[in-house]
Image: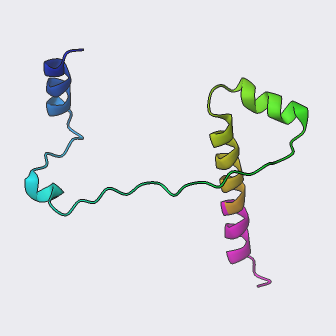
Amino acid sequence: MSDADSHAAVVSDPDIIPTDEDFWRNAKVVLPERKPTITIRLDADVLAWLKNQGKGYQTRINAILRSYMNAQNDGVSNNPKT
């Protein structure tokens, strides 16, 4: 796809909102927080399954753990015993 084709596709997309210099005037680059390096012990079959899902298995581990953490936090805040 050429630059012209790419530009035409963007311009014709109804979900794209045009922006101008004023829109970007106060924009700031925000870098993601650096993740600490850790060592974790996993069952061999669990690790094999994660790796067989394709590239990015460590990112997937993080997403799974984040999802579990959020579910637990939601459960705590919705727990009538608290």
Residue 3 visible in the displayed image: yes
Q: Quadrant of residue 56?
A: top right
| Rendered residue at 60%/54% (across/down) | 35
- Give above or below for 15 relative to 36: above
The segment highlighted magenta reads 70-82
* Quadrant containing the N terminus in the rendered view: top left
**Number of numbered discs on residues:** 0
- The one nearer the camera, 42 or 36, is 36
Residue 78 visible in the displayed image: no
| Rendered residue at 73%/24% (across/down) | 52
Q: Which residue is farthest front?
A: 37
Q: Position of residue 68 (x, y in %)?
A: 72, 56
Q: Position of residue 14 (x, y in %)?
A: 20, 37
By secondary structure, the bulk of the magenta-drawn segment is best described as helix
| Rendered residue at 81%/28% (across/down) | 48
| Rendered residue at 67%/68% (across/down) | 74
Q: Which residue is farthest top?
A: 1
- The one nearer the camera, 29 or 23, is 29
Q: Is residue 78 magenta?
A: yes
Q: Is residue 14 magenta?
A: no
- Give above or below for 14 relative to 66: above
* Quadrant containing the C terminus in the rendered view: bottom right
Side of 40 where 30 appears, left or right: left
- Give above or below for 64 relative to 54: below
Side of 42 where 56 appears, left or right: left
Q: Position of residue 12 (x, y in %)?
A: 15, 30
